[in-house]
Amino acid sequence: MLALLFQWYRRRFSDPEAIALLIILLAAFSILFFFSGLLAPLLVAIVLAYLLEWPTVRLQRLGCSRTAATSIVLVIFAGLLLVMMLIVAPVAWQQGINLMRDLPNMLNKLYVYAAGLPRRFPALVDAGIVDVIVENLRARVTGLGESVVKYSLASLMGLMTLAIYLVVVPLMVFFLLKDKEQMLNAVRRVLPRNRGLAGQVWLEMNQQITNYIRGKVVEMVVVGVVTWIAFVLMGLNYALLLAVLVGLSVLIPYIGALVVTVPVIGVGLFQWGLGSDFWTMIVVYLIVQALDGNLLVPVLFSEAVNLHPLVIILSVVIFGGLWGFWGVFFAIPLATLVKAVVHAWPDTLHADEHSVEP
């Protein structure tokens, strides 16, 4: 047994570049695991820097200096965010308040419908079970309302932190974009010298992360806008709020789409019942989801779709459990990183076999 372990160790860890890659991965994992909360503003800034790198490079090619290009891109991006906050956020917030007010009516309507099920299907549904389920839902909704109030009060304590982030994050993004090469050179100086294998993995993952962040933003906007237009044309209540939720759901592969379907179905049932309008809405919603999964995602994430769906779901669960939101957001790139490391990791046995071939 020990001989097998020693042989495996020699095959996998005899290359100094493999040891350097392992050290870099362990150091990065430890820093993110223990200091993810403190590094949240930096992570946000890095994501935004990846997103804004493409237009910055395009402006540089048009003759702008790096500093001027960075300033122009940040001003335009801040303006777009401000417009979104002034137009979309107030309407979505008001619709969310209205939805919370209508939840008791929705539950009463659900109770009336569920109360008739034992009479219609006495062999399948028990009246006692229906009462227990409905009462449990009412208790959860009441607890949800109290939690929202407590969260709102607690969030007041974090307004100062939010204000600091609104100042610190844009500054970080500006310097990450403007001094990109200087910062990369500074990082290279502290890395191990034998990092050829790590550099190979980094080049692949850098492009993957760039495409992934850009693709996720495009996917969120396209899915949210198309869903909003469809819901508005059908006259669905809370159309903008539900469209925002559907757009945000693409951050969590597979699981997000399943979770956001619940409020969409609930609002549709409360507004129309099991009529033709409800089923039309369901068909349109499923078409949007199908086009997203089978057309938009393969176009935007050509490399990511090579991962098996089970691998993606496990990545969401594992990395989400380790790093929360950021683990969920980067679940696919992290799974791709693991795949890239496994494929790039040297195997001296196979190398020796190839070397003796005629």
Image (cartoon, rainbow, N blue to C red):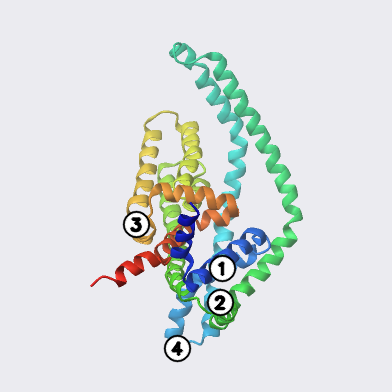
Residue, disc 3: 298
Q: Earlier in the sequence, mark 2 or mark 3?
A: 2
**Spatial CA span between label 4 and label 1:** 41 Å
- Residue at coordinates 66% horizontally, 66% vertically from top-left? 166
> For the residues carrying marks 1 and 3, which lies nearer the camera in this image?
1
Q: Which mark is residue 192?
A: 2
Comes first in the chain, label 4 or label 1: 1
Quick check: can you spot residue 79? Answer: no
- The single residue placed furthest to the left in the displayed view is 358
Question: Residue at the spot x=42%, y=85% of the render?
Answer: 61
Distance from the alpha carbon under mark 1 to that under mark 2: 9 Å
Residue 96: x and y in percent read: 59, 44
Which kind of residue does numbered mark 1 sit on? Ile
Mark 2, secondary structure of its residue: loop
Tell which circle, 4 or 2, labels the residue nearer the N-terminal end: 4
Instruction: Look at mark 1 in the image and give the residue it sits on.
Output: 23
Residue 216: image location, x then y, percent:
45, 59
Disc 3 residue crowd, few under 14, some 14–19, many 20+, Cα 10 Å = some
Where does label 4 land, which residue?
63
- Foreground mark, 4 or 2, reads 2
62, 303: nearer the viewer: 303
Judge whether 200 appears above or below 252 on screen.
below
Residue found at the far right of this picture? 157
Q: Helix, strand or loop at disc 4? A: loop
Q: How many residues crowd around disc 4 within 10 Å: few (fewer than 14), some, or many (20 or more)?
A: few
